[in-house]
Amino acid sequence: VTLQRSILNNVVSALRNGGILLYTTCSAYRCENEEQTQWLQQQHGLQLLEQQVLPGYRHRADTMFAALLCKY
Protein backbone atom coordinates (compact mmCIF):
# COMPACT_ATOMS: atom_id res chain seq x y z
CA VAL A 1 0.00 0.00 0.00
CA THR A 2 2.81 2.42 0.85
CA LEU A 3 4.62 1.75 -2.42
CA GLN A 4 1.36 2.09 -4.36
CA ARG A 5 0.72 5.49 -2.77
CA SER A 6 4.21 6.68 -3.58
CA ILE A 7 3.72 5.69 -7.21
CA LEU A 8 0.24 7.27 -7.28
CA ASN A 9 1.58 10.54 -5.84
CA ASN A 10 4.07 10.72 -8.72
CA VAL A 11 1.45 9.86 -11.33
CA VAL A 12 -1.16 12.31 -10.04
CA SER A 13 1.39 15.15 -9.99
CA ALA A 14 1.79 14.69 -13.75
CA LEU A 15 -1.94 14.44 -14.44
CA ARG A 16 -3.49 17.50 -16.08
CA ASN A 17 -6.95 18.86 -15.32
CA GLY A 18 -9.40 16.73 -17.25
CA GLY A 19 -6.88 13.90 -17.29
CA ILE A 20 -7.96 10.32 -16.75
CA LEU A 21 -6.20 7.80 -14.52
CA LEU A 22 -6.79 4.08 -14.92
CA TYR A 23 -5.68 2.39 -11.71
CA THR A 24 -5.40 -1.38 -11.95
CA THR A 25 -4.10 -4.16 -9.73
CA CYS A 26 -4.00 -7.92 -9.82
CA SER A 27 -5.18 -8.02 -6.23
CA ALA A 28 -8.37 -8.94 -4.43
CA TYR A 29 -7.47 -6.96 -1.29
CA ARG A 30 -9.61 -3.96 -0.38
CA CYS A 31 -6.58 -2.12 1.06
CA GLU A 32 -4.90 -2.22 -2.36
CA ASN A 33 -8.02 -1.41 -4.33
CA GLU A 34 -11.08 0.42 -2.99
CA GLU A 35 -9.16 2.02 -0.14
CA GLN A 36 -6.62 3.36 -2.62
CA THR A 37 -9.32 4.92 -4.80
CA GLN A 38 -10.87 6.49 -1.68
CA TRP A 39 -7.44 7.87 -0.78
CA LEU A 40 -7.00 9.29 -4.30
CA GLN A 41 -10.33 11.06 -3.98
CA GLN A 42 -9.63 12.44 -0.50
CA GLN A 43 -5.96 13.37 -0.92
CA HIS A 44 -5.87 14.44 -4.54
CA GLY A 45 -9.45 15.45 -5.32
CA LEU A 46 -9.86 12.92 -8.11
CA GLN A 47 -13.37 11.93 -9.07
CA LEU A 48 -14.14 8.24 -9.29
CA LEU A 49 -15.92 7.49 -12.54
CA GLU A 50 -16.14 3.72 -12.24
CA GLN A 51 -14.48 0.81 -10.48
CA GLN A 52 -14.88 -2.92 -10.76
CA VAL A 53 -13.46 -6.17 -9.47
CA LEU A 54 -12.89 -8.65 -12.27
CA PRO A 55 -12.92 -12.15 -10.72
CA GLY A 56 -10.34 -14.29 -12.41
CA TYR A 57 -11.05 -17.57 -10.65
CA ARG A 58 -13.72 -18.34 -13.23
CA HIS A 59 -11.02 -18.35 -15.88
CA ARG A 60 -8.18 -19.78 -13.79
CA ALA A 61 -6.55 -16.35 -13.68
CA ASP A 62 -5.72 -13.66 -11.15
CA THR A 63 -8.49 -11.46 -9.86
CA MET A 64 -8.10 -7.94 -11.24
CA PHE A 65 -9.30 -4.56 -10.03
CA ALA A 66 -9.75 -1.49 -12.21
CA ALA A 67 -10.78 2.04 -11.35
CA LEU A 68 -11.20 4.99 -13.68
CA LEU A 69 -10.64 8.39 -12.07
CA CYS A 70 -10.59 11.93 -13.44
CA LYS A 71 -8.75 15.03 -12.26
CA TYR A 72 -10.84 18.21 -12.40
Image (cartoon, grey):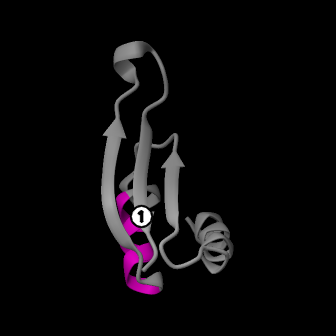
Q: Nearer the viewer, residue 27 or 24?
A: 24
Q: Residues within 10 Å of mark 1 (few under 14, many from 20)?
A: many
Name the residue rendered at 51%, 79% in the picture.
Answer: 17
Give left or right: position of 21 versus 69: right
Residue found at the very far front of the displayed protein:
18
Is residue 41 magenta-colored?
A: yes
Quadrant of res 45: bottom left
Report the side of 71 relative to 2 (left or right): left
Q: Position of residue 11 (x, y in %)?
A: 65, 70
Residue 19 position, x and y percent, is 52, 68
SS of the residue under disc 1: strand
How many numbered discs sit on the rendered protein? 1
Q: Which residue is mark 1?
A: 69
Tell me: residue 37, above or below residue 50: below
> Which of 8/46 is in front?
46
The magenta segment is 34-43
Q: Is residue 67 left or right of residue 50?
A: right
Instruction: Out of 57 and 11, give the one closest to the viewer.
Output: 11
- Image coordinates for residue 23, horizontal then vertical, percent: 50, 55
- Does 30 sit above or below residue 27? below
Q: Amino acid at mark 1?
A: Leu
